[in-house]
């Protein structure tokens, strides 16, 4: 959320204070400021000028030759704006001015001298309108600096919305001004309000059929609204706070929302006769102000004129009841809706607005009449012809209960750890809007309505209020005398950490973190199917299905980072959902997923690299060797041939595969990808072998390289199994040296290492063992090459 310090200063005097230091104080006491923007610092030398002559350029249909009077002198100017005419006042950048950080100097344009520039609002940095030059009021004094005429200089600070989730009162400038008043110890000025000047008996009928979803609904009819363009001051503030100017009535409702945090909505009064607040009996289509047709279900609250919907409550109005160019009368709505209902409805229809964000925070129902009175005050100031033509209709069906909290000073001192004076407690809580009475060390505190919807509910909340304003940085530094005991990590966490260390430190893999739901749009980029699985109720349209595999998310991470490196190795340990259990709960599994990507390595080499990582992982964690067996793919992205199940112990541990060619093409050209998944719960439960320590032999070893041919259907595991069965004397290590594929099968070169701790082995002794092994292989139809 963007906050204007000029707007804040309207309600609290900050003269003489260092604003930068004040904003640091705000971060320490209220909410963290993400960024600060200094508006107007890149604009100098722009003054009010009058166009006293305007002629068409002889060789152009768009350019005009102007003479602009700034009272000090008359400037020649070439201008291409379509709305320039003789007699208007403009924002004129003279020779030597600075506009948007760019210096303005005399130049020749289309053969004519131009000694300055007539500026648009975009060039002044006060709106996005660049099609026309800005027209100033005829009463503006010629030669006056534009910054003297308009509030262009401002300091805007940005606060992350999540920091204000529990503070609905801070979603407007007046609430922010209250915070600054308390921080600085200065007085908060009252918000100007006006009662509608109407003495008749007419009113807008309002019926609330869902009192559980609509707590209060106030409305007022006003006619004879003649103003169309909002005042420049309003447009500038709206733009600085991230909103665009639409028309006077829409801008005024947005202005008040940004000022006090209470959303307003203005309906064309010609289309409103009898307001009914209800939910539809069946799903219905509704066209919102943005022109989109949306499906409204039976749980979404609607504002209706009789039976015809005119707005989605708390979210957005309807296209049919919007303010139009000829609108002179409005029905003004100020309401308070159930926060949970608005949040769920907003998620269901996929539409989040500035209004819905505020309603989701549980607004104070007392603010509806304040907003209407503020609207009346401002419209009478900026459009005096507008008049109220009805009484204020106010249907108040649910009021939050008043909250009164008792606490004693001993409680505050004990929880804060410091001694806070009685007078400081009284003055601080009073400045924050609480009603406080004191009897000795006992305090009786009544919570204001704007803090009682979800924020302040018990005395520990009051301790936080007092200590944050006191300043945590003002607490004396003292050592604690508490007994500190290290927490014991669970076995699962220890195992996860070990696996991560192996993957990162030994194999240079990068850990990523992803969401548990499938992102349909990102899946589509890689041709991945969002497979049927458990879904999230009220999830975003493209993010409702929970994942059943880690690999698609890792492939997306590779896809989004592939331009930064020729090879990537990523992994994540997280949860997937494999349907539901018998108790109708999500069947969550903790899965290790890994993806290897390379532009320079073959698919075969990458596949065996993945096998090497898995082998190393299992040996280091359990002292076990896995077995790989060809498997039928269960996901469309798995390679139809190069997919295997990983077995270890008594069952399946996971899968390893290459990527399906169609998905590979979408990921990139001339690349290779290998993936693997391991079930971490199965890995945790595997009974590993104990670490065995052997004294290193002081005698030389003998290496034998044997190449065997594996016919189709056979694997290295068959070869290795026979080596284990023969229990060869003095054999200390077995490894694969090389693999070569032929038409007849696969040739595998195996390295066998023989070593003794008792003597130096001779070749004849080892040869006996080798012959015994070869005979075993031949008996099982495994031939030497």
Image (spheres, rainbow, N blue to C red):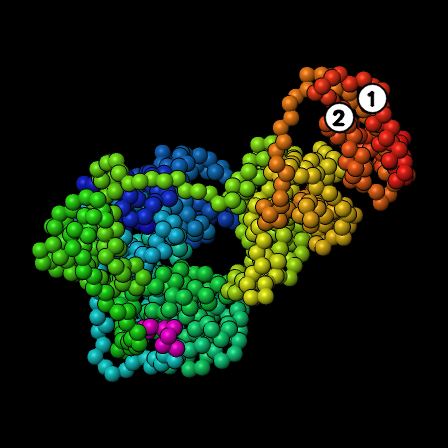
Q: CB under 8 Å between callouts 2 and 1?
A: yes
Please tell me whether residue 709 is drawn above or below residue 455 in the rendered image.
above
Residue 42 has which mark?
none
Please tell me whether residue 263 is drawn above or below residue 81 in the rendered image.
below
Q: Nearer the viewer, residue 701 or 115?
A: 701
Q: Position of residue 537 (x, y in %)?
A: 52, 65
Q: Quadrant of the C terminus?
A: top right
- Tell me if 680 is positioned left or right of 748 in this view: left
Q: Which residue is at 51% across, 73% downward?
A: 297
- Tell me if 767 is positioned left or right of 72 in this view: right
Q: Position of residue 231 (x, y in %)?
A: 32, 57
- What residue did someone put label 2 on? 730
Which stretch appears magenta? 210-217
**Considering the numbered disc 2 on the image, is that residue within a helix, a strand or a loop?**
loop
Using a 10 Å C-alpha cutoff, classify the residue at mark 1 as few (fewer than 14 neighbours), some (14 to 19) or many (20 or more): few
Tell me, yes or no, whether the highlighted magenta stretch contains residue 565: no
**Considering the numbered disc 1 on the image, is that residue within a helix, a strand or a loop?**
helix
Q: Which residue is at 77% across, 47% downward?
A: 630
- Tell me if 163 is positioned left or right of 539 in this view: left
Residue 765 has which mark?
1
Q: Nearer the viewer, residue 510 or 485?
A: 485
């Amino acid at each position: 959320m963007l906050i204007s310090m000029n707007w804040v200063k309207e309600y609290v005097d900050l003269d003489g204070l260092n604003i930068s230091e004040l904003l640091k104080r705000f971060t320490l006491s209220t909410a963290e400021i993400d960024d600060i923007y200094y508006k107007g610092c890149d604009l100098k030398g722009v003054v009010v000028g009058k166009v006293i002559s305007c002629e068409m350029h002889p060789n152009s249909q768009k350019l005009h030759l102007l003479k602009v009077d700034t009272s000090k002198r008359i400037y020649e100017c070439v201008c291409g704006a379509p709305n320039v005419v003789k007699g208007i006042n403009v924002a004129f950048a003279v020779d030597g001015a600075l506009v948007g950080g760019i210096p303005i100097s005399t130049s020749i344009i289309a053969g004519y001298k131009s000694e300055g520039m007539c500026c648009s609002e975009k060039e002044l940095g006060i709106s996005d309108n660049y099609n026309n030059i800005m027209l100033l009021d005829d009463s503006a004094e010629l030669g006056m600096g534009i910054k003297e005429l308009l509030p262009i200089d401002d300091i805007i600070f940005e606060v992350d919305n999540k920091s204000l989730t529990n503070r609905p009162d801070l979603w407007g400038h007046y609430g922010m001004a209250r915070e600054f008043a308390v921080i600085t110890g200065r007085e908060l000025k009252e918000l100007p309000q006006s009662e509608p000047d109407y003495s008749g008996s007419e009113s807008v009928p309002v019926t609330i059929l869902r009192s559980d979803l609509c707590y209060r609904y106030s409305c007022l009819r006003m006619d004879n609204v003649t103003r169309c363009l909002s005042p420049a001051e309003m447009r500038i503030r709206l733009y600085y706070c991230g909103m665009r100017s639409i028309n006077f009535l829409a801008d005024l409702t947005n202005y008040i929302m940004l000022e006090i945090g209470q959303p307003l909505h203005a309906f064309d009064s010609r289309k409103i006769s009898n307001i009914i607040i209800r939910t539809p009996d069946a799903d219905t289509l509704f066209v919102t102000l943005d022109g989109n047709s949306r499906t409204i279900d039976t749980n979404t609250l609607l504002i209706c004129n009789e039976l015809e919907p005119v707005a989605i409550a708390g979210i957005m109005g309807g296209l049919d009841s919007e303010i139009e160019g000829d609108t002179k009368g409005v029905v003004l709505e100020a309401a308070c809706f159930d926060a949970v209902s608005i949040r769920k409805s907003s998620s269901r229809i996929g539409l989040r607005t500035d209004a819905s964000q505020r309603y989701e925070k549980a607004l104070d129902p007392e603010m509806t009449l304040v907003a209407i009175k503020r609207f009346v005050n401002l419209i009478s100031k900026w459009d005096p012809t507008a008049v109220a033509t009805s009484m204020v209709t106010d249907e108040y069906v649910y009021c939050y209960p008043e909250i009164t909290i008792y606490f004693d000073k001993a409680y505050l001192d004990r929880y804060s750890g410091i001694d806070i004076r009685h007078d400081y407690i009284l003055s601080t809580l009073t400045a924050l809007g609480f009603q406080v009475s004191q009897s000795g060390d006992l305090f009786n505190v009544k919570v204001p309505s704007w803090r009682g919807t979800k924020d302040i509910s018990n005395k520990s909340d009051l301790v936080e209020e007092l200590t944050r304003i006191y300043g945590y940085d003002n607490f004396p530094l003292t050592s604690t005398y508490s007994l500190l005991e290290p927490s014991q990590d669970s076995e699962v966490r220890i195992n996860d950490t070990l696996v991560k260390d192996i993957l990162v430190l030994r194999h240079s893999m990068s850990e990523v973190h992803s969401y548990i739901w499938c992102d349909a749009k990102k899946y589509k980029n890689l041709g991945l199917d969002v497979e049927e699985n458990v879904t999230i109720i009220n999830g975003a349209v493209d993010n409702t299905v929970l994942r059943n595999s880690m690999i698609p998310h890792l492939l997306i991470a590779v896809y989004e980072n592939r331009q930064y490196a020729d090879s990537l190795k990523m992994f994540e340990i997280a949860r997937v959902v494999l349907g539901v259990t018998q108790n109708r709960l999500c069947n969550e599994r903790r899965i290790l997923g890994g993806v290897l990507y390379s532009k320079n390595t073959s698919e075969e080499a990458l596949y065996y690299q993945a096998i090497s990582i898995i082998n190393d992982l299992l040996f280091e964690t359990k002292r076990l060797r896995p077995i790989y067996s060809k498997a039928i793919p269960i996901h469309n992205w798995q390679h139809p041939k190069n997919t295997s199940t990983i077995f270890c112990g008594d069952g399946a541990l996971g899968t390893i595969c290459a990527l399906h060619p169609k998905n590979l093409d979408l990921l990139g050209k001339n690349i290779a990808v290998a993936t693997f998944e391991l079930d971490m719960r199965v890995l945790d439960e595997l009974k590993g072998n104990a670490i065995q320590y052997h004294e290193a032999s002081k005698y030389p070893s003998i290496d034998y390289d044997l190449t065997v041919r594996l016919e189709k259907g056979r694997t290295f595991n068959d070869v290795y199994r026979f080596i284990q069965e023969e229990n060869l004397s003095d054999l200390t290590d077995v490894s694969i040296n090389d693999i070569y594929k032929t038409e007849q099968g696969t040739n595998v070169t195996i390295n066998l290492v023989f070593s003794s701790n008792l003597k130096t082995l001779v070749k004849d002794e080892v040869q006996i063992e080798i012959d015994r092994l070869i005979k075993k292989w031949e008996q099982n139809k495994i031939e030497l090459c």
